[in-house]
Image: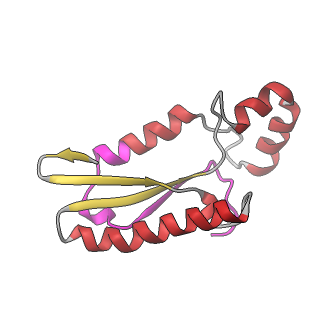
Amino acid sequence: LTSFDSLKCICFIASISGLESHGHPLYSAAKSATIAYARSTGRFLAGKGISLFAVSPGAFMSEDGYWGRLAKENPLKIKGFVDNRLTASKMPDDIEVANFVFLLCNNHSLNMAGSNYVFDAGQGRGW
């Protein structure tokens, strides 16, 4: 929860897995619920001066995460994924995702109430 002047901001981290199936069904279900909760609660809280929204990243590189470990073990698999699934032709890293969240939190407004912002380098196919 960040506060700038009198307007407060809450950002949920969801995933594109909540919008289309990527990975385990339980993970997708949990992220779908996160997006739905942000959508309904964000609308409710906007009337109380609180901006609540979600960010749904796709795959991103983090040294200790799945993609970071895979990059060390099988860099050709990462290259194939990027070439075939990411229209941006580059996988974002954890700092880029964090900067996007920070940007939204620093520039939020009540007009963002319940919104879900996708940050996936073009990975998503379902919307």
Position of 99 relative to 45 (above/below): above
Quadrant for the C terminus in the image: bottom right
| Residue at x 38% of width, y 74% of height | 40
Which residues are drawn in magenta? 103-127
Res. 4 image quadrant? top left
Q: Please check the rendered image and state whether residue 117 is part of the magenta-colored stretch, yes or no.
A: yes
**Residue 11 coordinates in the image, percent (x, y):** 38, 53
Residue 8 or residue 121, whichever sits in front: 8
| Percent position of residue 116, x then y | 46, 62
Task: Give the side of residue 13 with respect to residue 66, left or right.
Answer: left
Q: Say whether residue 110 is magenta.
A: yes
Identify which residue is drawn at 19% across, 71% down. Answer: 47
Residue at horizontal 56%, vertical 68%?
A: 32
102 sits to left or right of 111: right
Q: Nearer the viewer, residue 121 or 24?
A: 24
Picture quadrant of residue 22: bottom right
